[in-house]
Amino acid sequence: MLPMFLALGTVFGALGAAGAYVISYSEYRRRRLNPGQSARRMALETAAVTFVVFFLAAIVLSFLL
């Protein structure tokens, strides 16, 4: 059952990360950031965290069910 949840976690994690990237990038672009901050880098960090959360949630859910 774990491989199925890993596949689902990967697919939904990628979809969630893409959505989080688009939303956070548009928000960071709209705000005026400091000269050292990059909207693209900050949005990628948000997307990476989103992917990890979805992936770990799928792993935990596989052990609970």
Image (tube, rainbow, N blue to C red):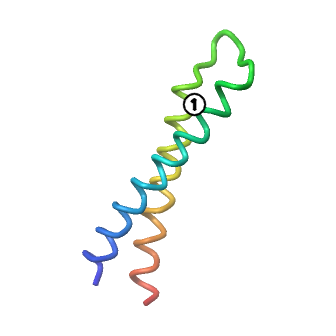
Q: Position of residue 44 (x, y in %)?
A: 49, 35
Locate residue 34 relative to residue 39 in the image: left or right. Answer: right
Which residue is found at the position 63% from the left and 12% from the top?
36
Which residue is the extreme one toward the top? 35
Which residue is the extreme one toward the left? 3
**The C terminus sits in image quarter:** bottom left
**The N terminus sits in image quarter:** bottom left
Locate residue 19 relative to residue 34 in the image: left or right. Answer: left
Which residue is found at the position 40% from the left and 72% from the top?
59
Vertical placement of residue 30 versus 64, above or below: above
Between 4 and 64, the one nearer to me in the picture: 4
Q: Position of residue 10 (x, y in %)?
A: 34, 61
Query: What is the number of callouts on the image?
Result: 1
Vertical placement of residue 32 versus 49, above or below: above
Residue at numbered disc 1? 42
Which residue is found at the position 45% from the left and 53% from the top?
51
Locate residue 50 relative to residue 65 in the image: left or right. Answer: right
Which residue is found at the position 61% from the left and 38% from the top?
24
Locate residue 20 relative to residue 13 in the image: left or right. Answer: right
Query: Label 1 is placed on what type of residue?
Result: Met
Determine the image quadrant of residue 35: top right
Vertical placement of residue 61 versus 26, above or below: below
Vertical placement of residue 16 versus 32, above or below: below
Q: Mark 1 packing: few (<14 Cα in 10 Å), some, or many (20+)?
A: some
Label 1's element?
helix
Between 63 and 31, the one nearer to me in the picture: 31
Which residue is the extreme one toward the bottom? 65
